[in-house]
Image (spheres, helix red, strand yellow):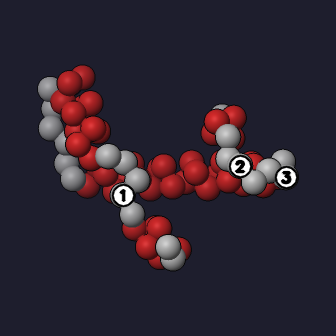
Amino acid sequence: MTEETTAKDTLVVASKTKDFIKANSGMNTSAAVMEILSERVRNLCLQAIERAKSEGRKTVMDRDFQ
């Protein structure tokens, strides 16, 4: 995968996200929400990667997201 492709990939499961929002609010979800959520997930992952690197690890762990 190239960096360009990775930056555009949807990283959330749209159907699960829409189902969750519907079940908890009765509301529908715009398709644009997936782009925004994916961007947030990408940013969280990049931060976690940096934390793991700073500790000399090659594995991103749950604690890297805290």
Gap in Å between the C-alphas at discs 2 and 1?
22 Å
Q: Percent from the top left, x then y, of residue 58?
A: 75, 54
Gap in Å between the C-alphas at discs 3 and 1?
29 Å
Residue annotated with mark 1: 10
Q: Percent from the top left, x then y, of residue 45?
A: 58, 51
The residue shown at (51%, 55%) is 42
The residue shown at (61%, 56%) is 46
- For badge 3, the amino acid type reads Gly
Report crowding for label 2: few under 14, some 14 to 19, many 20 or more residues within 10 A (C-alpha): few
> Under tag 2, what secondary structure?
loop
Label ID, residue 48: none
> Under tag 1, what secondary structure?
loop
Residue annotated with mark 3: 56
Relative to the observer, which residue lies in front, 10 or 47?
10
Residue annotated with mark 2: 59
Relative to the observer, which residue lies in front, 6 or 39?
6
Residue at the top extreme of this rendering: 24
Q: Percent from the top left, x then y, of residue 38?
A: 41, 53
Q: Nearer the observer, disc 2 or disc 1?
A: 2
- For badge 1, the amino acid type reads Thr
Is residue 59 placed above or below 6 in the rendered structure?
Answer: above
Is residue 33 placed above or below 28 in the rendered structure?
Answer: below
Query: The C terminus appears in which quarter of the rendering?
Result: top right
The residue shown at (67%, 47%) is 60
Report crowding for label 3: few under 14, some 14 to 19, many 20 or more residues within 10 A (C-alpha): few
Earlier sequence position, callout 3 versus callout 1? 1
